[in-house]
Image: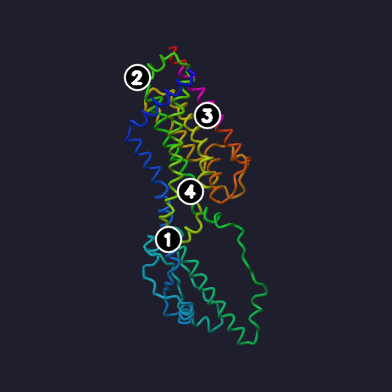
Amino acid sequence: MNRLATGLTIYRKEIVDALRDRRTLLTVLASSVLMGPLVLLAISALVASLEANAEQREVAIAGLERAPTLVNFIARQTYTVKPAPADYEQRLRKATLADAVVVVPDDFEAALVRGEAPIVEIVSDSANQRSQASAARAVRLVEGFSRERALLTLALRGVSPDALEPLRVAERDLASTQTRATQITGMLPFFVLMAVLTGALNAALDTTAGERERGSLEPLLMNPAERWVLVLGKWGAVASVGMLIAVLACSSFLPGQWLLRSDTLAAMFQYGVPELLRFLVVLLPFAAAASALLMAVAIRCKTFKEAQASTTVVMLAASLLPLINVFSLGEESPWYLWVPALAQNVLMTHVLKGEALGIDRLAPPLLVCAAIAVASVWFVARTLRSAAVR
């Protein structure tokens, strides 16, 4: 009973200390609360701009006076034809021109009359995302013109146009609506992970290296309570801060959906209370383990700045590990679920896809988080015990 009372006293003391630094606390809380709306707003703005560019039924042609038949065909597809600027290549490189340019050769019409195939260039810049989107539209229009010319030629010669199409292709996409949405929203788990780590970092550093630098750690160690009880109280406070950040960050996506400017993205992005709860099942153990690990790294440091430098390795690893899932083009490997940060990123991506989280998926990261938390708390207690002896 005395151990429980001591642990709760340490917990309350650390929570009060965390709340006392209101500038840092407000910065962390505001960033976690505003993160969801801001990220969704940025994503929706990007999607909306791409959709607006795709809906613009305009085609830029260099030398349109040399291709009246092509211009007529494009106009019949309800597109507006406009002349390309003289410096279109330079403007495409600088991304000041959003439309790919159709370049018509000088002898375009004469070559068609002779039965030859003139070369029509579609000029774009792969570094210019907007021009890349319009390039596909321009290619489809030019290919449609080519097919129409071929069909008319066959019809004039008495050949059935079906001879050009011995078979027809029908596409069927097996991906669900939510799965297709993760191609755009798949970065959300990464932002949530970093918010949790950043929120737990300040509290972990302050309760270990910060107290040692201020000289308040030694009087605490003079308490006759067992070291592991003191460490559990400190860890509980830091983990509570990290868990609070996780709850706020995940909850911020609910009102953040109101800011979506793209109707397509709003229909595809399905994030409600069930998804929020699944996110928390994945994140809360990670927040507890990360808090303990950050404390274990910082407890060996004598100053706050030294602890910040030491924990940079943990933060860097946590930010790089999820990239394995991003750059993996094949099937997810089973060992992904045994790697911290990577496992959480994988599981939250599955939640966004609308997939269920079975015990076979949840067990490995939970076991790893429990092992990290126990080992880190034991290390901190052992370090404080030796510090008290010296």
Other-residue count near label 1 (Cα within 10 Å), few / some / many at <14 / 14–19 / ≥20: some
Mark 2 / mark 4, whichever is N-terminal: 4
- The total number of labels drawn is 4
Q: Is residue 89 above or below residue 386?
A: below
Which numbered circle lies on residue 215? Answer: 2
Spatial separation of the CA atoms under disc 3 and disc 1: 43 Å
Other-residue count near label 4 (Cα within 10 Å), few / some / many at <14 / 14–19 / ≥20: some
Residue with the mark numbered 1: 48
Spatial separation of the CA atoms under disc 1 and disc 2: 54 Å
- Please, what is the three-letter code of the amino acid marked with disc 2? Gly
Part of the protein shown in magenta: 370-384
Residue with the mark numbered 4: 187
Secondary structure, mark 4, is loop
Q: Tell me: 230 left or right of 91.
A: right
Is there a contact, CB below 8 Å, between mark 2 and mark 3?
no
- Please, what is the three-letter code of the amino acid marked with disc 3? Ala
Mark 2 / mark 3, whichever is N-terminal: 2
Mark 4 / mark 1, whichever is N-terminal: 1
Secondary structure, mark 3, is helix
Mark 4 / mark 3, whichever is N-terminal: 4
Secondary structure, mark 1, is helix
Of residue 192 and residue 249, the one placed in the foreground of this image is: 249
Q: Look at the image and tell me in which quarter the C terminus lies.
A: top left
Residue furthest right in the image: 166
Mark 1 / mark 2, whichever is N-terminal: 1
Spatial separation of the CA atoms under disc 4 and disc 1: 18 Å
Q: Is residue 90 above or below residue 230?
A: below
Q: Give the percent coordinates (x, y) of residue 89.
A: 40, 65
- Please, what is the three-letter code of the amino acid marked with disc 4? Met
Q: Is residue 258 above or below residue 203?
A: below
